Structures are given as C-alpha cells and as structure tokens.
Image: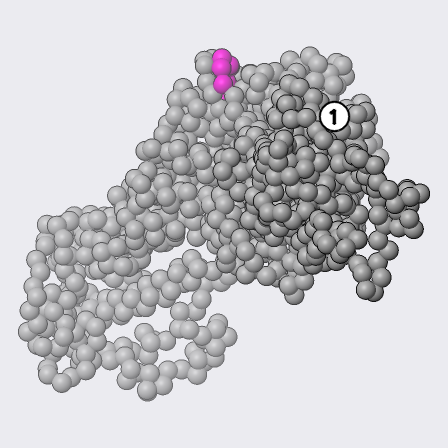
C-alpha cells in the first residue's frame, strides 16, 4: 500500500482505477529522454500488460493512442500510427480515462498567424504562438483541439496555454469571427522552416501550415495561394486580422526622398533627418521594417519600426529632435525614439542608409559622403554636396515634388537641393479659365498701370519685391494702408557690401515709413544659415483676386515715368482668383516671422538723417487689357523653377525666343550639366529654332561665353538653328533687365528668374507661364524690336565690327569666325580690295565693294595714298574716308584717277577676286617665278631663283624699286605710298592684336557681380559708370614713350637703314 497513496488496501474493485507512485531509484525509473517500456507482471512474474513510448513531455501524461482522450475518434479513428503511447489531452491521475462522444461541433477553425521564433522579447506575447480564427458562425470549444508537428510533438489546447486578451470571459470558447492565440513551448516549432497541423478533438486534421523562410521575431501568414508556403506578415497582429499586403504599399512604393545629414549647427545638435515617402496608392505600414545605418568603417546599426504608418502619396520625416526641427519643417515629423526601437544618428561625414522590409528585402538605399558604396541597393559614387561651405544642406530626390527616378545611383539625387527652413512647394500651380490679362512692357508701360492697380485695393495687398525706391509706388502703398487695406510688404534686407549707401537708405527709410503707418513690413534676410540668398521675386497680390508679376524692381529704372528712359522689362497683371490664391499661399511662407530668414521691420530701421523723397507728377496711358479663356502655370524658385523651365523648353515645337538679362551656362551650384542649357540644346537638336537676346550692360566673360556658345559652337560648328545677340540701346531703353521667353508664339514667360545657377537654386524667384497666342503677341512684338534694334557700339560677336554695320552690309552679326576660312570676320577681306573688314569699318568704306566710290582705284590704294598725303607737306592732307568715298578727295577739281591713273602712280596691290567692281582681273593659279607665291598674289612675279622674298613675293631690291615714283606729279609719292602701305600693314597687325586682346580681356570691374549674384546689378541701375582699367594707345614701335624719346635722341643707326631699303632716316624714325 505504500506506493498506492489513495488506497488503504491493495484490492482494486471492478472499473476502479488506482494510482501507483514510482519513486525512481537507481535501479528502477522511467526514461524520458529516450524510448522505454514498462510492464505489469502478476504474482507469478508473468507480464499481464506492457506499455512503450518514444516521446515524452515534462509534466504530461501518456495514454493509449487509440483513446479518445489521446485525441482519437470513436474506435480509435484517426489515432496515431503504431502502439507507442502518446500525450493525453490532460493528465487524469487516479481517474478513468475520459471517454468523449463523437465531435460534431464546428470545424471552421483556421490557422492564421504563427510566431515560430523570437529571442529578444520584441514581440508580444513573448512565447512562440499560433493564432486561430473562427471563420464560421458558431462558437467553438477549443478543448481537446491539438497541434502536431513533423517532429511528432503535440500540443493540446487548454486554458493554461490560451493567451488571455481580456475579451472572451469563457477562455476556451472561441466565438464566431474571433481569434485566439495559443502559446507553445519554445522548442515545439522552429524559425528555420517547419510544418504544424491543427486537428479537431477526434484527431481529424483541419488545417496546416508549412514554411521554409527563415524567420526571427517575425510572424508568418498564408501565402497568396492555399498551397503556397507561408510568408512573413507585414507586422505581428496577435488576436487581430493580418494586414493584407495587396491593400498595403509595397517595397517599390517606399523611397527615401530627402536627407539632411548635417544637423550639428547652432540650432540643434541632432536635428538631422531622413524623409521617407510612400509614392503608392495604399497605406504603408512600417511595423516590423527596419532602418539600417552603415558607417564608412562598415559599422552597422539597425533599428526596427514598432509603430509607424505612412498614408498613400504622403511622406514622414524621421528625426531625433522633433522640437528643433519643427521650427523649420512643417511636414509630418516622427520622433525615432517613439516609432522605432532605437534612434539612428546620421553621420555628418557619410554613411549608407537602407530601408528594409520584414522579409529582409531592401526597399531603398542612399549612400552619402564617405559612406560605403558597395552596399546592396546602390551603384556607383556616393552623394556629395554640390559645393562646399554651405550648412544645413538638404538633398532632394528628383525635383523634390514627387517626380523622381530610381536607378539606385547618385543621379537620382542630382536635380535639386535645398536648405533647412526653405519651402517645398509641390502643388501643381496650374490655373485656367476666364480671366483678364494686361501685358506690361517697360519702359513704355508699367508704372501708370501698377499705381492704378494698387489704388483699387479694398481689403488686402501683399507685395514682395527685391527693392522699393519708386516714390509713386511707395505712396500708392501708403495710401492703401491709410485707407484701411491690410498691407504686407516683404523686402530684401540688402547687403552693404553690394548695395550703395543710397540704395540701403532708400530701402530702410521707406520700410520704416510704411511700418510707422501700420503696414506689416518684413525683412527677407540672408545670413549664412538662411535658406536663400535673396528675395528676388517681383510679385503682388491684391484682394486675393488679382496678381501683378514682373521682371522689374519697384524703382525708377524699371518703373520709369512715362516717356522716360528705362529698362526693358516685362510685367503682367492677371485677374484670376485661383491664380491669386496659389500665389498668395506661397507668399505666405515668406511672411512667416517664425522662420529664421524672416524678421519684422520697424520704425527703428529708419536711417540717420532720413528725409522722405517726394514723388513726381506724370501723365500717361494704360496698357490694353486682354480678356479670354487662358491657362498658365506658376513657377517658383528654387522649388519648381528648374523643372518648370525645362518642361517649358521641352514643350517647344518650332521656336524659342529668349529675352534675358543673364544666361549662365555653368552649373556652379548644382551637379553635372546645367539642366536648362541641356534642355535648350536638346530642343535645338530636334529642330527647334532658338533666338537669344542678352543684356550687354554688364557684359562679362560668362555672358560672352553664352553668346559664343550659341553662335560659334551650336550654330557655326554644329549647324543648329541658333543665334544670339547683345541687345542694343536707344533713347528710350537703357538696358535689358528682362527674364522672359516666348515658346512657339503661343506661350510667354514673365518672371524675375535670371537664368543662372544662383537664381535657380538659391533665390526666391517667381514667374508665370501663360498659354495664349493673343497674350504672347505684345511680348513677341517687343522681342522683335529688341532683336532688330542696333546702336553705334554693340558688337554681339566681338569681331570688331558693330552690329549695325554688319547688318547694313549683310555681314554676319552673330558669328565672329567665318566658317569657310576659320578667320575672324573683322580680319577678312570680303571684297578682295586689300582692306579687311575692320579697316573698311574704320574708314567708312563698303566692305562688299573693292572700289567703294567707283573711280577705278582699288580701296587699298586709296587708303595708302590718303595716308601718304599726311607725310608730304607739299600737298593737302586727305583723309582715308574721303579718298575711299570721293572721286576728287583732295578737292582740286580733278579726280585722282584722271590725274594719276587707277594705280595712283604705279602702286601695285592685290586685285579684287570677286565681282564687286568693274576692274576684276580674274584668278590665276600659275607661279611664273616659282617663289611659292601665286602670280595673282605676287607683287613681284619675276623674283630671281634662290633670293629671299617676303609674303608679297618681292625681294629687298624689288621692294626698293617699287618705292620709286613713276611720274613727276607725285615726286617721292611712290616711296611715300610704299612706306604707308607697310606702315598700314603694321598698324593693321598691331590694331588687330589689340582688338583681339581687348576682346579676350575681362573687364572685371564691369562684371557688377553678375556671375554669383546677378540680381545685385539691379541695385546699381543708375550708378556712376565704373572706371575700367586705364588704357593708353600703345606706341607702335613696341617701346614705351620714354624709350621712344631716348631713341629719337640717339638717332637712327646704319643697321636700321639697311633693314628698310629705300627708306630714309626720317621715314624709319
């Protein structure tokens, strides 16, 4: 009785069960790690019953496999194969094994989620578990349902292994459409691939799950098809429905779109951030995803997302300092410490960042700075700053507004960049409908219209301009404020290093006056940490209904009084509420005083000794208004102006007309090639005609380079239909200050945008592209006026010949070099008269006629004769101009051709080789004296063999003979003429050198800050002319004036006389 604790006698009654306790000893114990057998023997030692087993579970009892309490059906249906005992549904010591009726309950039970393995406690519940879902309409008692594994482990569902979620009071009853989580011992299933099945109480298998994917702290769910292996869920959802991947954003939808890695500045030490965008049409749930940071030394840190979602077509900004960053960024800021199980700090020097889904698939990669470029998902060089010395740089993917590519290379990030605190306007900014449009083309239109426009303000007036100096406009704003209009004015804060004292005083004086009157006046400042260099936009919105926009500042140069000299500028007034609201919504960003670059102006800004200037009275007319159904697009820098301009150029079909103050072909503040220039080149290559007018008032190397690229390279070398000129001025137009374009005569751009990398990437600029042939027409007419206008000085191609003269004589206004001869057009002798075009221009002769005045004397001889008269005191001086243009140049009543003949006394020069005169001799390719000079070009066709000769084919003796006079009328005239011809040649040679040298010399004093900050030229419109380098006419003998005086005193040596046969000492001196 000692081992039957519940019995007092060893007798067992019929149908009675007894519990026999086996206190294992060294000689008798039951094995639990290997198979074993135990037998029941009678008193005679005969085995009555034997039991075997191969698998045990600590704390669990074994039972006959055919027993219903072992999970078999009636009569052992669905029992385990073999005779080895198996685990029971639950231990029943001292009791008969329960007998159950056949199971007739619902079998609508499904395995829906499994956690096979997790050892870091990141998933709750922490144990391995299986989720079941009652998919039917009836409750299911989970008692005696069980799981089996391919390793012959079994787990019966009991109350002690059901995860209590507090929802169902009867823990083992699973209501319809509810879910239960069954906890498993951690060794039952594995994350290396396994199979588990679900059986009902009668041992019938109802469901199973098989997976081959390796998983760690990631739950599994059904594959797309019932027969597929199980796959990772998007994130664990114990007791809840699994997220449907088809209803969620995929890895292709999630991209890194902005990055600021350098947050270690005066604002905060950890406000760096990475922006993740969901470009798909479904919500992105990042639970279970991770962000991996790999340093340049390949040190890896990975943090997992525990709670983060991104709506469709939206973005979130991950940062470690939302408080600091919120001062500059208005997007959805997410603190890494709350959304992730760790914060990822972005290395200033560089790193690789990877966004990884729960299955280990890399959704996106970016490598910046000195980060490792050989990580998965990246190819080629890393992303580095476009130029040095700028803090709080924000890298943008694509245009920063959703237009992006995904090549896994740095080119994905080379379109745009920004700075902390700058705007990111990404709305379509298109408008259309019925509207009134008033084209304003300065200097004839602008001021009268704008003053009248301001006077009509009823409720609000918002003005953003670079400079405010025009007193009539100032008084119009002041009157509006005094009339109760809510006035807001944003002005550039100026720069004392760039602006004159007068400009600074006017800007701050007028701002203080408006502030004193109650207007909201704001400074758009530009410190080293500000997101922009300047506010260079010129825009105003009245009553939320009407917009003025233009290229001209509100100062007298761009807004002159009627009939007053001023800049060529384009402006426009658009009466359209939708357009006004879009413009105003963007202007409000630059009216936010919480931003670092916006500060309040006040009366204290008034300069010392300030006196308010008076305005001027005027009479003028209003520009014509055009009404119609039009469309257009707002273009804002630096947000969308690059893509906007490129798109505009790409839309061209036949013609692009540009009217620009500045065009910079370089891309100093960006990566790679200038996208605007590349778009222009592409347009030209597909056959679009391009004509460019550039401002010449601040002509510098960059502007001339643009002219030369268009004319010499694209047109001259590449044969594209492209031309460019420098705009000429006249009595009404001072300079080209415009920033406009006309596309196919159908669309017109009116803007403040200088076409250079600084304006496009660093300034606040605005423009409007209006699509209407009717609206474009006035601008088209003004453009053609500017193209056709010529003045006395402008030389677009820098060939030494002004545009007006080249146009007059049908020379090439735009190309410096003649392609057929590869020679500067100024040095070409177009008519073969012995004078190149630059000399013809100098003396006022016809470059297309060898004999300008038709007197039979070739122009070169006439010039030589005229210059010789200056050397002969016995005859009156004759100017080369008169000699070339008058038959009787010396006024003696006798034509020179009659007095001295067509050769003026026997002087031989090259005959013309074209048909511009009546004395053409034709060409000849013979060389009679074999001296290497063709007879047509040989002044001495009988030069002896072996004698040194010059480029004219003459020896020294022959040159002396040519200098001998031919008749008595011009004693010594032949010698004088020869001397003058030689001196003229020297003069022309030196003059050509000086011209070319001056062409290539940079007048740096005149550049007026165009290359870096083109807009600062606006600040000096009517300033005193800047003195360029001192320049004196050179001494033609190559010596200084002092050296010349010394040599004159010393006289001419015999060696000098021998060098010039036929010349006397005075001539050489």
Q: Report the magenta residues as a range.
A: 432-442
Image x and y of residue 593, in percent: 77, 33
Residue drawn 71% across the image and 26% down it: 141
The residue lying furthest to the bottom in this view is 1054
> Is residue 653 at all visible to an observer of this figure?
yes
Task: Give whichever of 922, 400 is nearer the camera.
Answer: 400
Q: Residue at x 79, y 34 (%)?
A: 15
Residue wearing tag 1: 173
Q: Quadrant of residue 1004?
A: bottom right
Q: x and y percent of residue 299 in the render?
A: 67, 62
Q: How far from the left and from the top, in percent, is residue 264?
A: 75, 53
Does residue 815 appear anywhere in the picture?
no
Quadrant including the C terminus: bottom left
Q: How is the image coloured?
A: one colour
* In-image side of 654 versus 170 (left or right): left
Would you identify the image quadrant in which residue 576 lies? top right
The image shows a total of numbered marks equal to 1
Residue at the front extreme, as displayed: 44
Viewer-side residue, 206 vs 487: 206
- Relative to 476, residue 370 above or below: below
């Amino acid at each position: 009785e000692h081992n039957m604790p519940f019995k007092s006698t060893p007798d067992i009654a019929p149908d009675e069960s007894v519990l026999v306790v086996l206190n294992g000893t060294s000689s008798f114990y039951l094995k639990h790690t290997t198979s074993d057998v135990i037998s029941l023997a009678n008193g005679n030692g005969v085995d009555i019953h034997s039991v075997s087993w191969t698998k045990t579970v600590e704390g669990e009892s074994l039972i006959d496999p055919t027993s219903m309490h072992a999970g078999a059906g009636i009569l052992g249906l669905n029992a385990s194969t073999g005779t080895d005992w198996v685990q029971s549904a639950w231990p029943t010591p001292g009791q008969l094994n329960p007998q159950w009726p056949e199971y007739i309950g619902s079998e609508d039970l499904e395995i829906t989620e499994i956690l096979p393995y997790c050892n870091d406690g990141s998933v709750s519940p922490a144990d391995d578990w299986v989720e079941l879902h009652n998919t039917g309409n009836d409750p299911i008692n989970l008692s005696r349902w069980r799981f089996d594994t391919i390793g012959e482990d079994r787990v019966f569902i009991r109350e002690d292994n059901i995860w209590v979620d507090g929802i169902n009071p009867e823990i083992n009853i699973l209501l319809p459409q509810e879910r239960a989580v069954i906890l498993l011992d951690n060794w039952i299933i594995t994350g290396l691939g396994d199979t588990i099945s679900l059986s009902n109480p009668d041992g019938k298998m109802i469901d199973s799950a098989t997976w081959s994917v390796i998983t760690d702290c990631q739950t599994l769910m059904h594959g797309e098809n019932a027969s597929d292996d199980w796959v990772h869920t998007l994130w664990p959802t114990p007791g809840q429905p699994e997220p449907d991947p088809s209803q969620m954003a995929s890895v292709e939808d999630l991209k890194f779109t902005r990055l600021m890695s350098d947050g270690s500045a005066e604002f905060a030490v950890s406000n760096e951030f990475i922006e993740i965008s969901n470009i798909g049409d479904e919500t992105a749930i990042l639970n279970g995803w991770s962000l991996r940071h790999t340093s340049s030394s390949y040190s890896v840190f990975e943090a997992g997302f525990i709670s983060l979602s991104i709506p469709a077509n939206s973005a979130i900004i991950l940062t470690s300092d939302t408080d600091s960053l919120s001062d500059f960024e208005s997007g959805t800021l997410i603190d890494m410490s709350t959304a992730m199980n760790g914060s990822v700090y972005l290395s200033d020097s560089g790193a690789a960042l990877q966004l990884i889904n729960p299955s280990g698939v890399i959704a996106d990669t970016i490598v910046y700075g000195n980060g490792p470029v050989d990580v998965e998902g990246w190819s080629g060089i890393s992303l580095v700053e476009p130029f040095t010395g700028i803090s709080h740089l924000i890298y943008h993917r694509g245009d920063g507004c959703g237009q992006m590519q995904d090549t896994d290379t740095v080119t994905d990030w080379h379109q745009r960049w920004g700075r902390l605190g700058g705007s990111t306007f990404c709305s379509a900014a298109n408008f259309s409908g019925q509207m009134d449009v008033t084209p304003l083309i300065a200097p004839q239109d602008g001021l009268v219209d704008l003053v009248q426009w301001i006077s009509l303000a009823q409720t609000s007036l918002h003005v953003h301009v670079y400079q405010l100096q025009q007193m009539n406009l100032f008084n119009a704003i002041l009157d509006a404020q005094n009339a109760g209009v809510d006035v807001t004015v944003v002005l550039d804060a100026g720069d004392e290093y760039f602006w004159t004292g007068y400009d600074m005083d006017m800007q701050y004086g007028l701002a203080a006056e408006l502030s004193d009157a109650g207007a909201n006046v704001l400074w758009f400042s530009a410190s080293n940490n500000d997101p922009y260099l300047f506010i260079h936009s010129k825009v105003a919105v009245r009553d939320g209904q009407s917009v003025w926009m233009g290229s001209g500042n509100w100062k007298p140069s761009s807004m002159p009084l009627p009939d007053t000299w001023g800049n060529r500028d384009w402006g426009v007034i658009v009466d359209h509420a939708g357009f006004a609201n879009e413009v105003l919504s963007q202007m409000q960003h630059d009216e936010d005083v919480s931003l670092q670059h916006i500060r309040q102006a006040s009366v204290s800004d008034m300069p010392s000794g300030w006196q308010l200037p008076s305005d001027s009275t005027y009479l003028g007319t209003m520009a014509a208004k055009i009404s119609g159904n039009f469309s257009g697009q707002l273009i804002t820098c630096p947000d969308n102006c690059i893509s906007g301009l490129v798109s505009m150029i790409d839309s061209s079909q036949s013609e692009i007309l540009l009217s620009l103050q500045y065009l910079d072909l370089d891309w100093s503040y960006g990566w790679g090639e200038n996208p605007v220039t590349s778009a222009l080149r592409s347009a030209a290559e597909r056959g679009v005609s391009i004509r460019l007018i550039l401002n010449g008032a601040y002509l510098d190397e960059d502007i001339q380079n643009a002219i030369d690229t268009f004319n010499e390279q694209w047109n001259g070398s590449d044969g594209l239909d492209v031309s460019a000129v420098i705009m000429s001025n006249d009595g009404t137009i001072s300079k080209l200050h415009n920033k406009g374009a006309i596309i196919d005569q159908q669309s017109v751009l009116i803007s403040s945008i200088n076409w250079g990398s600084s304006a496009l990437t660093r300034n606040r600029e605005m423009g409007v592209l209006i699509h209407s042939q009717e609206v474009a027409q006035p601008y088209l007419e003004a453009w053609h006026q500017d193209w056709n206008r010529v003045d006395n000085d402008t030389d677009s191609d820098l060939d030494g010949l002004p545009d007006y003269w080249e146009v007059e004589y049908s020379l090439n206004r735009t190309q410096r070099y003649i392609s057929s001869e590869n020679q500067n057009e100024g040095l070409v002798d177009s008519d073969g008269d012995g004078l190149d075009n630059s000399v013809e221009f100098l003396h006022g002769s016809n470059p297309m006629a060898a004999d300008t005045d038709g007197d039979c004397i070739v122009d070169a001889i006439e010039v030589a004769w005229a210059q010789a008269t200056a050397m002969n005191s016995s005859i009156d001086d004759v100017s080369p101009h008169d000699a070339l243009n008058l038959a009787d140049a010396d006024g003696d009543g006798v034509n020179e051709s009659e007095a001295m003949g067509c050769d003026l006394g026997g002087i031989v020069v090259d005959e013309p080789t074209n048909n511009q005169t009546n004395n053409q001799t034709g060409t000849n390719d013979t060389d009679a004296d074999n001296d290497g000079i063709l007879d047509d070009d040989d002044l001495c066709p009988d030069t002896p063999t072996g004698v040194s000769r010059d480029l004219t084919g003459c020896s020294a003796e022959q040159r002396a003979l040519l200098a001998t006079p031919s008749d008595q009328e011009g004693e010594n005239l032949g010698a004088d003429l020869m001397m003058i011809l030689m001196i003229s040649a020297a003069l022309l040679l030196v003059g050509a050198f000086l011209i070319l040298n001056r062409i290539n010399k940079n007048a740096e004093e005149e550049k007026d800050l165009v290359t870096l900050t083109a807009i600062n030229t606006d600040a000096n419109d009517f300033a005193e002319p800047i003195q360029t380098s001192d320049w004196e006419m050179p001494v033609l003998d190559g010596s200084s004036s002092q050296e010349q005086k010394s040599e004159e005193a010393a006289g001419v040596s015999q060696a000098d006389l021998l060098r010039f046969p036929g010349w006397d000492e005075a001539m050489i001196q």
